[in-house]
Amino acid sequence: MRTLCLDIGGTKIAAGLADTAGVLLHTATRPTPARRDPEGVWAAVAAMIADALRVAGGTVGAVGIASAGPVDLRAGTVSPINIPGWRGFPLRDRVTDLVPGVPVRLGGDGVCMALGEHWRGAGRGARFLLGMVVSTGVGGGLVLDGAPYDGRTGNAGHVGHVVVDQDGEPCACGGRGCVETVAAGPAMVRWARANGWAAAPDAGARELADAAEAGDAVALAAFRRGARGVAAMIASVGAVCDLDLVVVGGGVAKSGRLLFDPLRAALSDYARLDFLAGLRVVGAQLGGEAGLVGAARLATMTFGRR
């Protein structure tokens, strides 16, 4: 029996059908509606579900949902920062209404990304894993002792808001000095511009990476600064959770050695405890499909209601 999986974020909505091994047999994506009222966004999600059900012949065995957060697993609601119209939106119940009699499980998009990479990607075989995305923001999720770890409310793994600079810039979360203010693509671009990077007004992280590849000193410094912030965060989370592997994906991570070389070098400075000596950092393998694969895995795992 196929599993219906959903991955809902502020930029795109994805739906898929997975077999029991986590292979995606069908996928579809559409932009998240610019019209951000609750029912407008829900209508887009419902249409994606209807299309997937038609492909599945009208029947699926389970549904897994990866949603941008914060989430409330107990209530089954979501309040994504990047979907302003959804505040306490009853996503699990709405999906359940469309697939009556089928188990529906909800998880944060970070934990589903981690779970997907743990099941079918770069995290296979790891017991204590942090999966994270470095893109327009920094997000993550934890798989501890082989199982997704949600924490008290379902929001464990929000590593983008680990503080790495006590006197740093204000963050969208309301805090200050979070790693997201240092390592997210837009943050690196802002720092580079403030420090003399001469680029077109619409240049972003991709152009910054191109400049760094070409040897631009400021662009290279921006990547080194971002990488050190990520490394400091990984060392902190690694010490708290006794990790053995970190899987990094996202648009900024696609810059490859520009991020990973200084990240690994800085991690060797920060992660000095003996039990962190074997902590590895690798690139993600599943790309944009990690959330769908993780949602499918979540839907078929055996544990309490989510």
Image (cartoon, helix red, strand yellow):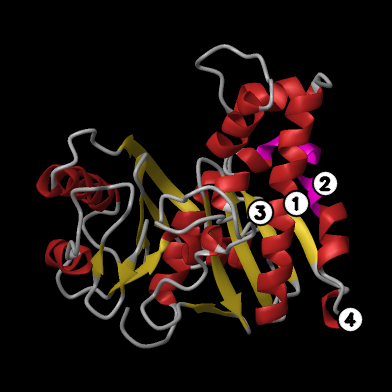
Foreground residue, 154 or 121?
Answer: 154
On screen, 255 above or below 41? above
Q: CA distance from mark 3 to mark 4?
A: 23 Å
Which mark lies nearer to you, 4 or 1? 1
Which mark lies nearer to you, 3 or 2? 2
Give the image location of residue 233, x and y in percent. Answer: 67, 63
**Disc 2 target residue:** 262
- The residue depicted at 57 percent of the width and 31 percent of the height is 190
Foreground residue, 205 or 150?
Answer: 205
Side of 24 where 77 appears, left or right: left
Q: Which mark is residue 240?
A: none
To which quarter of the image does residue 143 belong?
bottom right
The range drawn in magenta is: 254-263
Number of numbered discs present?
A: 4
Q: CA distance from mark 1 to mark 3?
A: 14 Å
Q: Amino acid at mark 1?
A: Arg
**Disc 4 target residue:** 274
Sequence-wise, which precedes: disc 2 or disc 4?
2
Q: Secondary structure at mark 2?
A: helix
- The residue depicted at 74 percent of the width and 68 percent of the height is 235
